[in-house]
């Protein structure tokens, strides 16, 4: 008999009833150190007092009115994002997948509004842009996501990751946009080198194609900058954001320049819940905290400490770990075995991590995690690795 919750997840036999900072607690009081943060969602940890206050204050006043009306909280968050980024305008969604759908629509509408037949969007192997039909059509080489869901939407060309010659050959007068994650998350914590991001910007400028960055996982301070593309000193035309921007509350956004968004006039897109007062009140508080230079400096300091400790872990377990990769507090341990083995062993050490492709174990802690908790996480990873090695 099928369970009441559709069985599309391979869930761990764990359930949590309480969270505080970087720790989660089960019903019997067992505490787990969370190095996954809800897959890079809980940017300020669990039950962050500032976010609880923002949410409860707004909840006591107004939850939902719909986008038939002006929403002051939405306006305030949009203004903050425009002030802090390349963007001139923002549309709010409830998730990264919804942000992907709009980014795709916006790029195609841009060219249609100009009377040009440019609909092709270039994506890259290993990418993950969501699980809607449009998003999986953008990443057709992922069999687990696309098998049985055809026919997929046309108009996407997926290229090998890092193949510059293939990219140059693929851009034609039909290319509407190039869509890429500055740091691949699901694909195995693979940062795009700064010079390659600059090259993408140059290529788009030369050909007119729009440059779309998917910063759903790597954005909102995760890389040590407010957004990961800032390290390369360039900007996109359109950017997808979600996960960390809500600090745990479902919230996403598409940021765009005035030119890129020029085709999106009244009636071309909408969302019942997108930009609701609750989500935007929380998002505004997240932005207020995370965008502070001193906060980002702390992210980078902790990232350096964690990387140093992980290098020591690799040296201590050369048969289990191969290398560390990533930027900021979006780090991956390349394993010499299936990362799910390490995830399971870490459960035994009351440590939560996240697997990814290419045999990578993702470490995505809260951005305000303490140095003591980072050290404790590596200690528990060390014990998990020793456990696996003894069992081999």
Image (cartoon, rainbow, N blue to C red):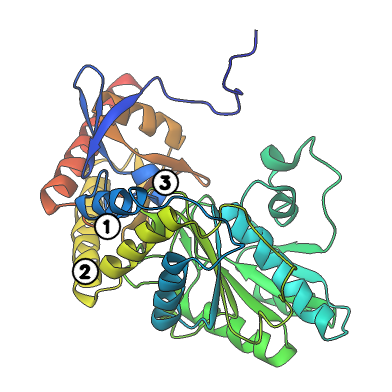
Q: CA distance from mark 3 to mark 2?
A: 20 Å
Seen as rendered, the residue at the extreme left is: 372
Count neighbours of disc 1 (C-alpha within 10 A) and say few if under 14, some if 14 to 19, many if 20 or more. Answer: many
Q: CA distance from mark 3 to mark 1?
A: 12 Å
Of helix, strand and loop, which one carries label 3?
Answer: helix
> Whole-percent x and y of residue 316?
21, 43
Q: Is residue 84 left or right of residue 114?
A: left
Q: Is residue 366 visible?
A: no
Of helix, strand and loop, which one carries label 1?
Answer: loop
Residue under numbered circle 1: 367
Please report whichever mark, 1 or 2, sits nearer to the chain's N-terminal start.
2
Residue under numbered circle 3: 39
Give the residue drawn at x 68%, y 59%: 101
Using the image, determine if residue 239 lies above or below residue 335.
Answer: below
Query: Where, quadrant-wise, is the N terminus in this rendering?
Result: top right
Count neighbours of disc 2 (C-alpha within 10 A) and say few if under 14, some if 14 to 19, many if 20 or more. Answer: some
* Whether label 1 touches label 2, CB < 8 Å: yes
Residue under numbered circle 2: 295
Which is more toward the observer, 160 or 299?
A: 299
């Amino acid at each position: 008999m099928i369970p009441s919750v559709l069985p599309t997840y391979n869930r761990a036999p764990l359930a949590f009833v309480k969270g505080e900072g970087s720790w989660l607690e089960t019903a019997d009081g067992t505490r787990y150190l969370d190095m996954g943060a809800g897959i890079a969602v809980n940017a300020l940890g669990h039950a962050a007092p500032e976010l609880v206050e923002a949410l409860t204050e707004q909840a006591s006043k107004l939850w939902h009115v719909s986008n038939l009306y002006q929403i002051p909280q939405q306006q305030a968050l949009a203004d903050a994002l425009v002030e802090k980024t390349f963007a001139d305008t923002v549309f709010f969604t409830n998730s990264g997948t919804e942000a992907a759908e709009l980014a795709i629509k916006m790029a195609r509408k841009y060219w249609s509004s100009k009377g040009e037949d440019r609909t092709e969007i270039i994506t890259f192997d290993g990418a993950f842009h969501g699980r809607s039909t449009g998003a999986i059509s953008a990443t057709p080489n992922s069999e687990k996501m696309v098998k049985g869901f055809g026919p997929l939407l046309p108009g996407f060309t997926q290229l090998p990751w890092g193949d510059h010659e293939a990219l140059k050959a693929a851009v034609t007068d039909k290319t509407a946009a190039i869509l890429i994650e500055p740091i691949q998350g699901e694909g195995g914590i693979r940062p795009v080198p700064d010079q390659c991001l600059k090259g993408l910007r140059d290529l788009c400028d030369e050909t007119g194609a729009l440059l779309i960055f998917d910063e759903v996982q790597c954005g909102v301070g995760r890389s040590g900058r407010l957004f990961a593309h800032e390290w390369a000193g360039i900007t996109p035309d359109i950017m997808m954001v979600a996960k960390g921007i809500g600090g745990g509350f479902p919230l996403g956004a598409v940021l765009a320049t005035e030119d890129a968004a020029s085709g999106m006039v009244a009636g071309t897109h909408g969302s019942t819940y997108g930009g609701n007062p609750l989500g935007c009140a929380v998002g505004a508080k997240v932005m207020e905290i995370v965008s502070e230079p001193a906060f980002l400096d702390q992210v980078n300091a902790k990232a350096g400490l964690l990387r140093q400790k992980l290098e020591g872990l690799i040296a201590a377990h050369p048969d289990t770990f191969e290398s560390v990769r990533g930027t900021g507090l979006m780090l991956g341990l390349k394993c010499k075995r299936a990362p799910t083995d390490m995830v399971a062993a870490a459960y035994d050490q009351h440590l939560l991590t996240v697997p990814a492709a290419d045999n990578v174990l993702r470490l995505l802690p809260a951005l305000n995690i303490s140095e003591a908790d980072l050290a404790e996480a590596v200690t528990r990873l060390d014990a998990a690795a020793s456990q696996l090695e003894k069992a081999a």
